[in-house]
């Protein structure tokens, strides 16, 4: 919500900074969406995001994985192939060995590459994560995790907000002295 407010403040503060596309000035306005359910809020608090990192064995290509998504592939905004780090490859091997010892079902083969999937919504990513984790046998993936990335830092958001009167720099004052301006600024806070 802070990003939406910052964008709205920046692009609607004056007509000089309004975005222009094909000679028309755009107005930034955000529609109100219905509130999230308790279950959705709980899942997001537990780490659910709209982006997934899927570790794949050599036998599953990116195209095959996208085909495995079925109708959920329509909600896929972007996908990109990623190499595994050495730590992920060794983790994948140890996980496969641990599952083999603990479970009589065949564990998925170790991961050799990864795919990043960006969905249009958190609920689509949650559904896909659940269905990929349920796969077994030759179509099983080696691992699925939510990708957590900051969109903007607090400093970047603050830089987008218009300056407020209290934020305007005041002349430096000697220690212990208070001027009318500083008393007025304190009263506003």
Image (cartoon, helix red, strand yellow):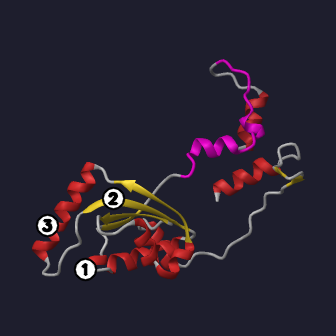
As measured in the structure, the alpha-carbon distance from the residue carrying label 3 to the one carrying label 1 is 15 Å
Front label number (3 vs 1): 1
The part of the chain drawn in magenta is: 151-174
- Could you say which is closer to the camera, residue 90 or residue 60? 60
Q: Position of residue 102 (x, y in %)?
A: 12, 75
SS for tag 1? helix
Q: Position of residue 79 (x, y in %)?
A: 49, 62
Instruction: Answer whether residue 164 is magenta in the image.
Output: yes
SS for tag 3? helix
Q: Is residue 131 depicted above or below 5 in this figure?
A: below
Q: Name the quadrant containing residue 28.
A: bottom right
Query: In terms of sequence position, does the residue under pointer 1 or pointer 2 come before the other?
Result: 2
Q: Are marks 1 and 2 in contact (CB under 8 Å)?
A: no
Q: In the picture provided, is 148 more to the left or to the right than 55?
A: right
Q: In the picture provided, is 77 more to the left or to the right than 34?
A: left
**Which residue, given by chain and number where applicable, does mark 3 sit on?**
97
**Which residue, given by chain and number where applicable, does mark 2 sit on?**
113
SS for tag 2? strand
**Which residue, given by chain and number where applicable, does mark 1 sit on?**
137
Q: Within 10 angstroms of label 1, few (less than 14), some, or many (20 or more) residues?
A: few
As measured in the structure, the alpha-carbon distance from the residue carrying label 1 to the one carrying label 2 is 18 Å
Q: Which residue: 42% across, 78% down?
A: 68
């Amino acid at each position: 919500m802070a990003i939406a407010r910052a964008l709205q403040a920046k692009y609607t503060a004056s007509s000089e900074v309004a975005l222009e596309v094909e000679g028309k000035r755009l107005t930034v306005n955000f529609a109100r969406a219905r509130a999230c359910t308790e279950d959705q809020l709980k899942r997001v608090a537990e780490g659910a995001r709209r982006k997934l990192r899927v570790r794949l064995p050599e036998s599953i290509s990116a195209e095959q994985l996208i085909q495995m998504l079925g109708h959920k592939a329509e909600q896929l905004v972007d996908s990109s192939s990623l190499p595994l780090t050495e730590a992920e490859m060794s983790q994948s091997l140890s996980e496969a060995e641990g599952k083999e010892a603990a479970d009589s079902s065949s564990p998925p083969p170790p991961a050799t590459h990864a795919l990043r999937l960006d969905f249009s919504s958190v609920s689509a990513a949650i559904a896909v994560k659940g269905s990929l984790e349920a796969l077994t046998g030759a179509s099983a993936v080696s691992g699925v995790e939510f990708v957590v990335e900051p969109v903007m830092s607090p400093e970047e958001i603050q830089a987008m907000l218009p300056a407020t009167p209290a934020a305007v720099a005041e002349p430096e004052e000697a220690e212990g002295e208070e001027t009318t301006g500083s008393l007025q600024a304190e009263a506003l806070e």
